[in-house]
Amino acid sequence: MLRPFTILLLSSVLICAADKKTQREEFRMRATVQDFVALSNYSGSVVPVDVDPRFAVIMRVDSITPSLTKFASGATVTFAIHSPSRLFGAADAQGKPHDFVLRRETTGEKTRFLSLEVRR
């Protein structure tokens, strides 16, 4: 009796797993850095792109390919990052446009952004 139940349970788990395939996407974004704020002092909404976010980087999107509704040209977007130095290195980034790679992952109904990198 236990064996048919186990087979049924495993089958349902496999079917659910097959329905929730993971899709990863990469976006090329050009944006101008407007400001950096300690995340503890920032009260707006942020897009987390780091496992240990400590700063908010506020940017104006110049362009993004492929298009992404929330990141349309001219939009202001705030990302939660670990630190400006980790993202930009020693470069003075504020007030300057940069090219970025933004990665996101979609599994079933859940979407999350994985990383934000400066293209060098």
Image: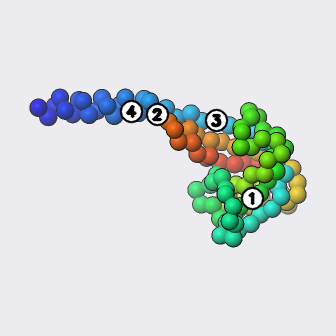
Circles 3, 2 touching at the beta carbon (< 8 Å): no
Residue occupied by mark 1: 57
Task: Give whichever of 85, 49 is nearer the camera.
Answer: 49
Residue at the image point whose x is 39% and y is 32% from the top: 16
Q: Indicate the secondary structure of the residue bearing disc 4.
A: helix
Q: Which mark is residue 100?
A: none
Q: Earlier in the sequence, mark 3 or mark 1?
A: 3
Between tags 4 and 3, which lies in front? 4
Label 4 to label 2, Cα distance in Å? 7 Å
Instruction: Classify mark 2: residues with Cα within 10 Å, few (<14), some (14-19) or many (20+).
Output: few
Label 3 to label 1, Cα distance in Å? 22 Å
Percent position of residue 118, x then y: 76, 48
Residue occupied by mark 3: 25
From the viewer's perspective, is residue 38 above or below residue 49?
below
Residue at the image point whose x is 88% and y is 57% from the top: 95
Q: What's the amino acid at mark 1?
A: Val
Residue occupied by mark 4: 16
Q: Indicate the secondary structure of the residue bearing disc 3.
A: strand
Q: Earlier in the sequence, mark 3 or mark 2?
A: 2
Give the residue at the far right of this rendering. Answer: 96
Label 3 to label 2, Cα distance in Å? 16 Å
Q: Indicate the secondary structure of the residue bearing disc 2.
A: loop
Residue occupied by mark 2: 20
Label 1 to label 2, Cα distance in Å? 32 Å
Question: In this view of the protein, can residue 99 be seen by the observer?
Answer: no
